Image: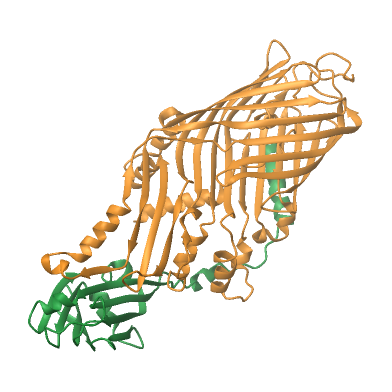
Amino acid sequence: MRKYSIIFIFIAFVCHFVTGQNKQLLYDFSEIPQSLLINPGTETDFQWYSGVPILSGISLQAGSSGISVNDLFANDGIDFNDKVRDRLINGMSPKDDLSGTYQIELINIGYRGAETDNFYSFGIYNEGDAIGYWFKDYAKLGFEGNADNLNNRFNLSHLKTRGEILNVFHFGVTKEIDNKLTFGVRGKLYSGIIDFTSTKNKGYFVTTEGQNNLLSNTLSADLELKSSGIITLDHVIDGDSSAGDMIKRGFFGGDLGLGVDLGFTYHLNEQTLITGSLLDLGFLYHSTDVLSYTLKGNATVEGVEIILPDAINDPNTDFWQDLVDDVEGLVPFEENRKSYITFRPTKLYGSLRYNFGETVQSKGRLDCDCNLSGGKSNRTKYANGVGGQLYVINRPRGPQAALSAFYQRRFGNIMAVKTTYTIDKYSFSNVGLGLNLQAGPINMYFMADNLLAYRNIAASNYASFQLGINIISWGKN
Amino acid sequence: MKKLGVFLSLITLMLCVVSCMEDQDFDQYKDLSVVPVFESSILYLESTEDVINNVPPGPFYSQDFSFNAFSEAFFSDRVLDGVITYEIENTTSKPLSLTLEFLNDADEVLDSEPFTIDPAPSGTLQRDVVYGDTGKSLDIIRNTSRIRVVAVNEGDSTSTSNVSPPLVKFKSSGKFSLRIK
């Protein structure tokens, strides 16, 4: 029982703290190599770079669109049960979610090809991503029961969750097509470690006045929970398997999938550009260590029924067992090991940017104070950039969007800062700040979101940070 | 690595300086009380007048059967109080009596609930039996694993009712509070 509790807590943790993260601060921050992972069509001027293994890209994001820690646990003298009932059970809607994501780069290397218009980057990163929507009617049934909810249908579709942990092996090419357009593509090989998904549930539970007896309970269910990797995790927790077995799953010993990222940067004129990227357009085929459960069918129960004279003719009838068998036959709870496919949470970024102010001398191959009329790469870097960004991620209840306004300032080639104001379903007051420092070949960056919420972090509905260290070379320059 | 240490220290320091948190009391979780109330039908018994008239006056039906809803650990460990509602309609021409007995695993009678029902047209009875602090012992419910039903014809076996169809219907439902947390 304890191990299942641990598994449940683990899944709950993943659900709570690890959504595809909106990296609005990192997006189009071309001084940072990791911006290529968000838009493979980002313009860079590096000759080569290498991320410091495990430290080159660490990011974490957590969001709750409905309730914050402070809403429940503030020491405000309000009865805790009232807070749970009013703010959680009745206050949140089935569209509210708890979600999160993390990403840790294991390897990230990039280099310019012999044909200098091409930049290649490759690496491995580990990613966890999960979302759980508020299962309102399940919670209401559990908190209140069905007694004072006659004729009230408890909607079983409120159970909607998915999550995964996987390693991603990637190789990307960024190519300057001409002086206006840079296009990038990144191929991805996914190696799934753990996955769970329960997103297409339907049905209801309702108590009504009975046809024969006083009450009638009806269950109409079409529920399914699919998972892979949970059995291995279970064995690791039990000590029957080593942690290495989980790690193996991340290196092609588990589920496999394919994906692709696409991106571009296009200059409308010398100072105005648009960018866009489509990330994780791909799927995973879960065929190993699969364990899935289904509950499908319809049943209406009015208690044990004894109808005479039928019951007299069969005096050995076990009414209770017959009732249990009938329900189990009508709404069977079944387990299966069938393979399944999940699609990755595809993300879309887009931006419009206007550069202005003094020019900044580039350290790299773009070391040229020329304008668009020049040849490839002859592009001026400006100290200031301002614009807007769009982010959309595909989620089980449909696309989820965020809109950001940003301002970026470069201080020579040593430091660059970017600040964003973002609105999304989690917050209307999300101000973020990103800092990039370049000390010789060493590049360090740190970014954090929703800074205003730090006045009372417990009341925050959203928190996110990214940091990393890289070694960058601009070649002979 | 020294630069890295300084960088991370500065970031940590900055966040520590700028971040605050109102006083939180996570011990409030201990005060959480989750006591849902569930209700469901328990037993429905129906008999036609023909069945009653087919045997001499006296018992016309007696049956023991297993009933594990109450003794399931999820229920019996959590039940706080409850009420069982009975409703009987008699549209037959004869007075009837019906007894419901709650039995444990050893077939010992834990409690008995007798009913006497008048013949049609006034043969309707409703009764609520409370269990818990203000009623009968909850142990009756917790330990019930079988139910015995005995139905007796207290009249004759020849008369017929003017009501169509002549039936006796025994209905019951339970409404119980459970301590989940």
Where is residue B167? Give x, y as percent.
23, 77
Picture quadrant of residue A196 = top left
Q: Which chain is orange?
A: A
Q: Name the outermost residue toward the right.
A: A358
Asked whether the viewer can see residue A23, the reply is no
Q: Which chain is green?
A: B
Q: Residue furthest top?
A: A114
Q: Residue at x 58, y 42 (%)?
A: A102
The quadrant of the picture occupied by the N terminus of chain B is top right
In the rendered image, residue A415, in percent from the top left (x then y), is placed at 80, 35
**Residue A353 rendering spot, x and y as whole percentages:** 82, 34
Tally of numbered tags: 0
**A422 above or below A374?**
below
Quadrant of the rendered structure where residue A37 is? top right
Q: What coloring was used for the rendering?
A: by chain
Instruction: Indicate the quadrant where residue A185 lies.
Output: top right
